[in-house]
Structures are given as structure tokens and as C-alpha cells.
Amino acid sequence: MSVVERQGWDVVVVGAGGAGLRAAIEARERGARTAVICKSLFGKAHTVMAEGGIAAAMANANENDTWQVHFRDTMRGGKFLNQWRMAELHAQEAPDRVWELETWGALFDRTKDGRISQRNFGGHEYPRLAHVGDRTGLELIRTLQQRIVALQQEDFAATGDYESRLRVFQECTVTRVLKDGDRVSGVFGYERESGRFFVLEAPAVVIATGGIGKSFKVTSNSWEYTGDGHALALLAGAPLLNMEFVQFHPTGMVWPPSVKGILVTESVRGDGGVLRNSDGKRFMFDYVPDVFKEKYAETEDEADRWYEDPDHNRRPPELLPRDEVARAINTEVKEGRGSPHGGVFLDVSTRMPAEVIKRRLPSMYHQFKELADVDITAEAMEVGPTCHYVMGGIAVESDSAAARGVPGLYAAGEVAGGMHGSNRLGGNSLSDLLVFGRRAGWHAAEHARGSAATRPVVDDAQVDAAAEEALRPFSVSGENPYTLHQELQRTMNDLVGIIRRQGEMEQALQRLAELRVRAARAGVEGHRQFNPGWHLALDLRNMLLVSECVARAALERTESRGGHTREDFPGMDRAWRRVNLLCALAGDAVALSRETTAPIRPDLLALFEKEELVKYLAEEELYE
Amino acid sequence: MSGYEARFKVWRGDAHGGGLEDFRVEVNEGEVVLDIIHRLQATQAPDLAVRWNCKAGKCGSCSAEINGRPRLMCMTRMSVFTREETVTVTPLRAFPVVRDLVTDVGFNYRKAREVPAFVPPAGVGPGEYRMMQEDVDRSQEFRKCIECFLCQDTCHVVRDHEENKAAFAGPRFLMRIAELDMHPLDAAAESGVDRKRTAQDEHGLGYCNITKCCTEVCPEGIKITDNALIPLKERAVDRKYDPLVWLGSKIRRRSSAG
């Protein structure tokens, strides 16, 4: 058997973005010895890319805001497919999670009376997003990172060792969740720097690895987003939920090619930016769907008045949920009314003075100036849809964040499914990370305590198999992992992208099967020390597995809803609202199954008008 | 502008040694240095080690020295160089090399742990924090820091003086102290921590002779020297030489301890 370093911990958190760090803080504060593993350096996780803000009904900017209104907006945004108990917990607990950040040193932008300022965003009825300019994700990650350091300082004072109770293993990748029978027993991984293998033994593992965007060509996601956690859960026997729902953010950069896909924050629209086509027309007025007709302005005058007087005017259609705006842009470009580089125009320059733009949107100003030679205070940006977020994910219990079917496995943040239904509202991601990161850490710590007397045992055979799997790229040859990755990205982008058709998805599944065969021959040069070719060869397994889940589920769901648009089934079908699609592994193959969702609790249904529910719910649900 | 073939020199090697390796590589319109490094990986040097993450100037991972100047590779446009120019990419000089362009930046994480954390004010609960925008502006400027460690790399106190590393936190973490010191609600003083004094006595503020090299390389445009280090020096000096301040701090500490 291979010689692999082993350590024992109570809770292991895989991923050090917002959800992972919040989980680790909670687990450590509840007494569990906690290890965090992350692929990048500590503090560099993809959460830093979040720009707009954290949605929480604190009612600082509009006193009518409550958790019930936030819940309603979230359900509408997700087209009622949300795991409603998660949406409820999220709306109820988000304010506490934001306020808690202030006690750890976060500095949000302020209102005139010194409270946390809140801004408008798509799909949110009131200004609800706590923010710091357009770099809110950085503030979140830094605050959590500094909270971790603060806890380590406490541990140093108590034990003389900063890492005695909470340790970050940075630049390490987990390739397998290990099991003792049904239960989680730990993780197997490697240090990216040295290539050395290690095992962390633990009765509880929290997966918080984020998303899957690196399987698509045009994406706002960083290299880390290779669907690791989704694949780890699948391989450990946990199912994935509703993987067909992938959010294409309406506004990514489109030019120059090397920055195509980089995010342009929704705050640009929340603060007054408008979308125009090549005719100079604000086209979003033509794309308000029936379910939202009463809530959005019908004229430019009314839309413009809303910024100053939201109580007596309806909001501009630029602030529809992201799926609606992305589809509209896609249509404009396809019908020949796009910008020179295949996007549409997003303009703030004619809407706000230059100083206001620079103050409210500093990183957008910087990003366009540095990367595209565009001065957004003087000219319009060119933008188009970019793969941004996956609503699907590990199927979890709402209250505990426990993965279904695998005792000891938990999931939080983007990698978990259910919370956002078929489409996530902007700002609901950072609050999701905090609310369910905390819950995952809490329940993982309790699970670990309950397992203290009967700790699971790591099986040597599984460790050997994991080591062998990880070394395989050094003993095969014939395929270049970089080439395979590019082919995968093209396949998903072109065939399972923003608009989907049956024939193309069938073609995608065929290509994915071929790529899987070829990936087994993906070889690498050099040795194990910081070898990016090797890392990519190992990540391919995860990207291919997850991509297959997306394609299979997308082919199965014969309707259009949220982040899943079928050209051959353009309408939303009320019969599909109660259907969850689950992907699980049967041997090597992805097996798809359907389940009926639990009925929404009557007191939550009572928050909506009957006329609205009729649009979403099937007859039998309405009269149950 | 159409594509062209550029000349690159990239440092390759590890802790035992290494040297510059020559490459000729395609460059297209709008590309940045990191794009070119990625193209080298995909086509010529699959095991070329480089750290990166967001590729949008927000995470601070892809720090390196380009033609000798500390920069983010993702924010350095190829258009700033002429087509004839050879572009030389080397790892950060102030930190030990791990492999190729990847260095061991552990120094920074050790220094981060030595700065006492934010101390929440007693009796102010979550949701009760009230701060005016003008009072948080300055600390917010410092919190724009993406921890790329370019300032730590360029600072001459440690750049070629390994021996100073033990006593000197570097611009990034002296700025962190300034950030906490200027936080309107930080209660460190009440808990017996004098941030100004520790900046001077424990984190090596005195080594800084305000040459502003850190400010010059900051990709976020933070005025590290003018807005963080000089004010911190002024406050630390007041603290150190003003006998009344000294006496006041002793009395306050005693009373809060009792």
C-alpha cells in the first residue's frame, strides 16, 4: 500500500469560499477541530468575484421590506421550483448573517443615518443588497478570512499553536471522499505544490466547492470551477438535483476575445444603467413575460421615475430576473440588432455624472479602462450572456444542509442544489453562502460529536485506489488535457448553452461519451511538483461527469423555466413545477430519476395572491 | 491589430536553481501576459507552473515580475510592449521560488496572523453598528487590497534583505494595522492593545522610509504610503513621545484591567 500522510480531524471543509469559510467558523466555534482544504491560496476563492451585494431584508433603505417579501421574490425568481424551506430559512436568517459580519470587522457602505446601505437589484422588490461599491465579494471573503485568523489567534493564546483547532490546507485538491460503509470517513487529496498525497480522516465532510462554469467556453467563472464537489458527491453516492438549471448572466464582457465572459455587475443596471440595441432602442420593454407584467414599467418615463420614487412607479424591465434579460439579449443579437462584437449596449454614461459612476462602480470603470480601452463614463459598454452560476447541485436536507443518502456528508453554497429553484436572483448567492455555510458547519460539528465514540475507519483499499487513480495521467499518453478541455467547453457552450434543442443535446451526450474515453488517455509530462497539466487531467474527470448530468437533465425536462430554455418547448409547463430531476451514479453511468416535490406549506403559499399562484401551480396544488 | 509572434523569456526552475527559457508565441488583439503564459502551457510547456485565479484583477493570485517590474499578469496588456520587445517574466523576487513562476508567499500569511484582529465594541450588538460613510471611507480604501503582495515584493526593506523579514510586517500588514486603527468602532484600546505602539515596536513601522515604492506597484491604486503608513507613523510618534498620551494610556489600561 502507498505511504500517505494521515491526520485526524472532526470536520473537514472542502472549499474556502464564502460557504466553506462560514462553515469552518461555525464548526470551530461549536468545538469541532476543523480543517479547510482549498485549491487556491487562502483568500483567493471565487467569492472575491462577487460584485453587487448580499441580499438581506434589513429594511434599511425601505422600511416595508421583510423576510416574507424576500421569500416571495426568491420563489418568483426561481419560478417556484425552489426547495421552499431553504428559501424560507435564507430569507429569515440573511439579516443576522450580514450584521454578524460587522462584528467581525466588515465595513459596508453606509446610509445617511449610519446603517448599512442597500441597493436595488434584479427581481428584488425593495433595495436589499448590502454592498461595498462593486467589490462586495472581496469584503465578504476578507472578513471571513480575518475571522478565521482571529479564531486562530485565540487558539494560539490557549494552546501555543495557531492551527491546533482550525487549519487551512491551501493549494490542495481533494479527489475522493472516503467512506466506511455508508458513512463518510474522510477525504483523499494531493498538495498542488509538492504533488504529495494526504488523507484527512473525519466523520463529517462539508462540500463547499462552488460551481461548474469551467465546462463552458464563455464564462465568468475562474479555473477552480470544475465541478469538483458535484463530482465528489456523485462518486460518494449522493444524488445531484436539477442540474439542467445553469444561469447565464446577461452581462459579460464580449470584447476583446481574451476577456470574453468576464462579469459586468448587475449593479450597473440597479444603479440606472440601461440596455440598448443597435437601433438605440431600450429593447427590454418588449420582453416582459406575462408572469411579471404587472410589476414592471411599460414606458421609459415610468421606468426612469422609479429610481427616485419607487413607491408610485414600477421598476424598469432591465431589472427583470437574469434569465429573462439573458434570453432577450440573445434574441436581439440573433435577429441582427446587436453591437459590433456580438453583444448589446449597456450604458451608464448618459445616465449618471462621471464622478458618480466612478464612485459607485469603481471596479467596472477600472476593468473596462484597463482591459478594453473603454471609458464607461463616456461611452456604452458592449455586453452579452456569460455562463455564471449553476442552480443545480447536491441534493440536501433544507435545515441541516446534509447531503441525501450519505451520513456525514454536507453541502453548502453554489454546490448545493434546491435553494434557488430554476433561477437565482442576484445578491441571493452571498446570503446563501452565509446562511447555509453556517448551517452546514453547525450540523457537521454535531454529527462529528455524535460520532466521537464510533469514529469511522478509513479503508486502506480506498486510499490505494485513489492514489492509483491520481497517478494514472503519468502512465498514459495520446491525448493533451488542454485540448480535451477546450473541446469540452465548446461542446457545452454550443450544444447545451443558453438556448437548447433536443438534437443538439443528444449530439452533446455523444461527444461527452467520446471525450470520456479520450480523457482516460490524457497524459502529462514532467513530475508531480506544481504541475498544471496534471491538475487539469484530474479535473477533467469531474467536468465530464458534471457536464453529462447537465446534458441528461436538460434533455429530459421538456419545458422552459428559469435557467433552462428549450427552443422546442418554449413555454413553462405547470405540470413540471412539481418535478425534481435527480442524477446519481450507477456504476460508471449517470442515471436519471424523477421525484415529486413536497407541497409548499400553506402559510407560505398564503403570502401570494391567488392570481399569481395560478400562473405557476398545477390545478391540484391550488385546491389541495 | 492582427496577431503576431512575440518573443518571451520565462524563468523556469525550482528551489535548487533555474534560468530564463526562450519562447516564441502567438499574440492576438486585446490579450494580456497571462493569456500568453496560458498559451505556452497549452502548446509548448504543459507543466509550466503559474498561479492564477480570477483573471480579472480581483483575486491577486497572478503576481510576477514583468520586465523586472512587479505586476499582475492578468492586468498587463500586451499592447504596452512593442512587437519587437522581448517580454521577460520572472517570479516575485522577495519570496522563495517553489517552481517556475510560483513562489512561497507564506511570509505574508505568517505576518497576517501577528496583527491582532478587529475588537468588537462592548455593548453594541449585531445590527446596532452605526458608522458614518465619511468615517469609514479611509479604512474602506485599505480594504480594497486584493493581497497580491506586490507591495511586499517591491518594498526595499525586505526585497534584498532577508534578515529584516522577522521584524518587518511589510506595507500590506502595516496598512492592515492602519485600517483597524482608523475603524470607527474598533475597541482594541479598551482591550489593552495599542495598535500604534505595536506598529512601531512589533511590526517594524520604523523601517519604512516612505519611498512610496509600494504605492507605485499597487494594482488597486491604494495610496498606501500617504494614507496609511505616514498617518500611522505620525500617530505612533505622538504616542511615543507625548508623555501625557503615554501616561493616559497607562492609566486607562490599568482601569480597564481592574
Image: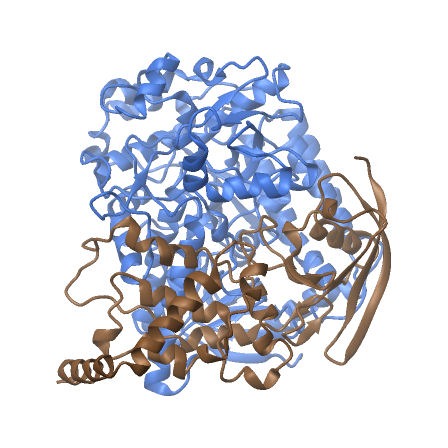
Residue A158, by quadrant, is bottom left
Camera-side residue of A462 and B124: B124
Measuring from the top left, give residue B44's x and y in whole percent: 84, 56
Left or right: residue A274 versus residue B106 is: left
Q: Residue at x 22, y 41 (%)?
A: A60
Image: A135 above or below B106? above
Camera-side residue of A158 and A282: A282
Measuring from the top left, give residue B252's x and y in whole percent: 17, 80
Measuring from the top left, give residue B235's x and y in whole percent: 33, 72
Left or right: residue A311 versus residue A516 is: left
Tint applied to chain B in the drawing: brown
Q: Residue at x 67, y 26 (%)?
A: A341
Residue B191, by quadrant, is bottom left
Residue A477, can we see it?
yes
Left or right: residue A268 versus residue B62 is: left
Quarter containing the C terminus of chain A? top left
* Colour-to-chain, blue: A
